[in-house]
């Protein structure tokens, strides 16, 4: 997910005012709106129909113990009796077995529904976490339920271009692109937006976060749950926040993990600027870790020297792509993942070290091997990401605005800035109507207590987002993993974080006030393979 927080030690980013989107912005749909009435109709219908769970489709490659079904939702909630689409849902029943005392039966607490973020990510595989030791106590009490949101295959999948054309490589990744390169990428963004309009047709306008929140309400009803127990990660936190605003009386418990800033003024253009700035700090964290392990990787004992090795690799790949597929953009994308997850650090450092020593294979293996199936899934995920973010809010429609804001930002945060622009630039040329973001804000007693989890140095969803959501949801409590930056911390290796998660989900207990946990251990280095002869 590409969202964020805007002020850094380098100083505040002075933004050019947003240029209004085309004059088609849709008003927020309030309690008395046609959409609200349509949601109630769809929820009643889903509650009566339920979900017929059975074997999962073979194409999804889910284990035999998992069961799958579908839920019918309106494409347009203002017209609930019009066209409908099917959302795919997966479930693993609660084990009811206490992992600490196999003889004790654990009472069930209903369904725990999860959204992994994106937008564009599928949650169909979520129930598998019940097999991970850190999740077994939760899996004993809850049916673990995942789903593919609208647009995400196999739930009425969206597409904006031929998947065979999606992985364009090798490509350059200039930190200070020329005017000619900017013009080329702007033309590509316009073509991509046209492709979304042509392939999505009239349905395209209905793929947005408000409808995702309404879908969540219908899935709740179909599961037979009187109130919703929900956990959202990354973009899933924004979805959860919208649900909390629209359906506060339907909330039982909610966990927000790695929080998108829900301020309407941030969604989505400013959030993405914030993210680019935060990734620069996280990129520095990674380089410092590599430098600390110079005895393993040989990339230098300072962050500056590690940066020099990265730049040398990028220059070499520009002249001669590794395996014919890995150029500077593919290198940047691979190391961007290291900004999301610490677990990538040893693998990426190993690949960079091996490449500079003459062996490109680890880099090719990690970055450059793509199948047709990979392309289809990635193209679908990108189409949904683009449609949801472009539909959700106004964006600048003049490239000069993007150019000014990001040229200024790239002077101090070059690592991700322009890559983030190219990812989101189709929104400048978007042809569907825009929604107006809801002002999420609940009063005391309106919403049950909720749990917010955040890593202090998360770059994908910077920490200010968690603070903002904490301010907006009365009764919420924030638990921070100090001096850590992995994106999404629930159910990971930090026992302190997991203790708070279990106390809340299993017993409804929250800390009396905001609190924090010590960081997880840094990853252990892996020794780079010897260069091939």
Image (cartoon, grey):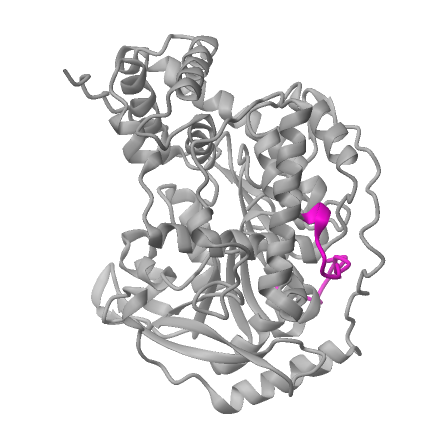
For the stretch drawn in magenta, the main secondary structure is loop
Q: Residue at x 28, y 54 (%)?
A: 132
Residue 371 x, y percent position in the rendering: 32, 48
Query: To which quarter of the image does residue 474 belong?
Result: bottom right
Residue 187 x, y percent position in the rendering: 65, 40
Q: Taking 308 as reference, is 76 above or below it?
A: below
Q: Residue at x 48, y 23 (%)?
A: 285
| Relative depth, front residue between 519 and 357 | 357
Q: How many marks?
A: 0
| Relative depth, front residue between 160 and 73 | 160
Q: Residue at x 75, y 37 (%)?
A: 399
Inspect this view and state whether residue 404 appears: yes
Q: Residue furthest left?
A: 533
Q: Taking 223 as reference, is 506 above or below it?
A: above
Q: Taking 35 as reference, is 353 above or below it?
A: above
Which residues are the magenta region?
Answer: 427-449
Q: Taking 360 as reference, is 52 above or below it?
A: below
Q: Is residue 432 magenta?
A: yes
Q: Is residue 40 magenta?
A: no
Residue 94 x, y percent position in the rendering: 33, 71
| Relative depth, front residue between 455 and 378 | 378
Q: Residue at x 37, y 25 (%)?
A: 321
Q: Residue furthest bottom?
A: 48
Residue 307 x, y percent position in the rendering: 46, 14
Of the 4 image quadrants, the one containing the C terminus is top left
| Side of 500 relative to 374 (left or right) | right
Inspect this view and state whether residue 465 appears: no
| Relative depth, front residue between 19 and 186 | 186
| Side of 407 relative to 362 (left or right) | right
């Amino acid at each position: 997910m590409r969202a964020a927080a805007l002020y850094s030690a380098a100083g505040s980013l002075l933004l050019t005012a947003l240029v209004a989107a085309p004059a088609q912005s849709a008003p927020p749909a309030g309690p008395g709106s046609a959409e609200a009435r349509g949601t109630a109709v769809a929820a009643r219908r889903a509650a009566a129909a339920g979900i017929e769970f059975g074997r999962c489709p073979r194409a999804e490659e889910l284990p035999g113990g998992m069961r799958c079904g579908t839920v019918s939702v309106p494409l347009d909630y203002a017209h609930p009796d019009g066209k409908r689409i099917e959302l795919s849902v997966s479930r693993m029943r609660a084990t009811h077995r206490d992992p600490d005392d196999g003889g004790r039966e654990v009472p069930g607490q209903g369904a725990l529904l999860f959204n992994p973020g994106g937008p564009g990510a599928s949650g169909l595989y979520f129930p598998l976490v019940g097999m991970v030791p850190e999740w077994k106590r939760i899996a004993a009490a809850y049916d673990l339920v995942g789903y593919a949101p609208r647009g995400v295959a196999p739930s009425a999948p969206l597409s904006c271009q031929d998947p065979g054309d999606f992985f364009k490589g090798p490509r350059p990744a200039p930190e200070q692109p020329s005017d000619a390169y900017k013009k080329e990428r702007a033309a590509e963004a316009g073509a991509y937006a046209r492709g979304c309009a042509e392939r999505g047709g009239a349905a395209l306008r209905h793929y947005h976060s408000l409808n995702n929140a309404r879908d969540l309400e219908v899935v709740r009803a179909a599961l037979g749950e009187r109130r919703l127990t929900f956990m959202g990660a990354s973009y899933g936190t924004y979805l959860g926040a919208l649900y909390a605003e629209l359906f506060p009386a339907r909330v039982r418990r909610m966990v927000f993990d790695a929080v998108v800033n829900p301020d309407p003024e941030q969604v989505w253009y400013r959030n993405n600027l914030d993210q680019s700035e935060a990734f620069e700090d996280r990129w520095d964290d990674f380089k410092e870790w590599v430098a600390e392990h110079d005895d393993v990787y040989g990339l230098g004992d300072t962050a500056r020297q590690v940066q020099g090795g990265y730049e040398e690799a990028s220059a070499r790949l520009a002249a001669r792509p590794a395996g014919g597929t890995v150029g500077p953009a593919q290198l940047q994308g691979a190391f961007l993942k290291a900004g999301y997850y610490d677990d990538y650090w040893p693998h990426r450092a190993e690949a960079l070290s091996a490449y500079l020593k003459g062996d490109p294979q680890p880099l090719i293996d990690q970055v450059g091997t793509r199948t047709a199936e990979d392309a289809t899934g990635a193209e679908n995920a990108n189409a949904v990401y683009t449609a949801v973010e472009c539909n959700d809010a106004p964006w600048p429609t003049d490239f000069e605005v993007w150019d000014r804001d990001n040229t200024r930002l790239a002077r101090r945060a070059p690592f991700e800035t322009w890559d983030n622009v190219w990812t989101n630039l189709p929104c400048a040329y978007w042809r569907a109507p825009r929604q107006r973001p809801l002002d999420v804000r609940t009063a005391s007693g309106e919403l049950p207590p909720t749990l917010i989890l955040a890593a202090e140095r998360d770059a994908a969803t910077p920490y200010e987002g968690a603070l903002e959501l904490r301010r907006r949801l009365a009764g919420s409590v924030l638990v921070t993993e100090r001096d850590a930056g992995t994106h999404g911390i629930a159910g990971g290796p930090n026992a302190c974080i997991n203790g708070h998660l279990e106390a809340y989900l299993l017993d409804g207990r929250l800390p009396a006030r905001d609190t924090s946990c010590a960081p997880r251990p840094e990853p252990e280095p892996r020794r780079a393979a010897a260069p091939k002869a």
